[in-house]
Image (tube, rainbow, N blue to C red):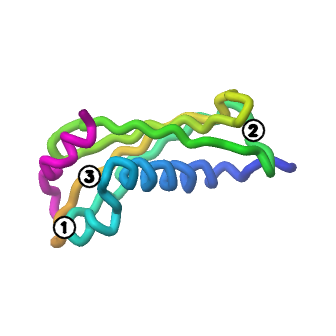
Amino acid sequence: MGVVYYSNYLVWFEVGRTEWLRETGWSYREMEVEGIALPVIEAHCEYRQPARYDDDIEIRTRASLLTPVRLRFDYEVVRSDQSRVASGYTVHAALDTTGRPCRLPARVAGMLA
């Protein structure tokens, strides 16, 4: 059909989230070394226009603190002509090394300011 398969948008959300963390000074690798994991506990995507193969796209990512143990990332998928292709969000729970919920580190609040 010449359009991007729908599940690829969730992969793009992950890329946006990873880059957001890196740009704010904390990588997933560092976070996991410090004993924090952020599994996805909810995901939502609204498809507005189809992205086509070879489209140049940008993933715009914002983050907000929902609770001391939950973080939400909001995404916009935008084509190079500035048309919005899709938008969505993921919600993540902070887990410690035993898999139990834990408070997000204080540095996370600083990243969201």
The three-letter amino acid code for the residue at tag 3 is Ala
Q: Are marks 2 and 3 in contact (CB under 8 Å)?
A: no
Q: Which residue carries the number 3 mark?
A: 93
Residue at image x 16%, y 63%?
100
Q: CA distance from mark 3 to mark 1?
A: 15 Å
What amino acid does circle 2 point to? Pro
Which residue is under mark 2?
Answer: 50
The residue under label 1 is which amino acid type? Glu
Q: Secondary structure at mark 1?
A: loop
Name which of mark 2 and mark 3 comes first in the sequence.
Answer: 2
Question: On the image, which quarter does residue 45 sit in?
Answer: top right
Position of 59 relative to 104 (above/below): above
**113 versus 23 height, above or below:** above
Label 3: how many Cα within 10 Å (few below 14, some 14–19, many 20+): many
Q: Is residue 37 above or below residue 109?
A: below
Q: Are marks 3 and 1 in contact (CB under 8 Å)?
A: no
Which residues, given as a range, are shown in magenta? 99-113
Q: Is residue 65 left or right of residue 84?
A: left
Residue at 19%, 40% in the rendered image: 109
Q: CA distance from mark 2 to mark 3?
A: 30 Å
Q: CA distance from mark 2 to mark 1?
A: 39 Å
Query: Is residue 16 found left or right of 37 in the rendered image?
Result: right
Instruction: Mark 2 or mark 1: name the one nearer the start of the chain.
Output: 1
**Could you say where residue 112 lies in the image, as x and y percent from the top left?**
27, 37
> Label 1, on which residue?
34
Image quarter in which the C terminus is found:
top left
Q: Residue at x 35, y 38 (%)?
A: 63
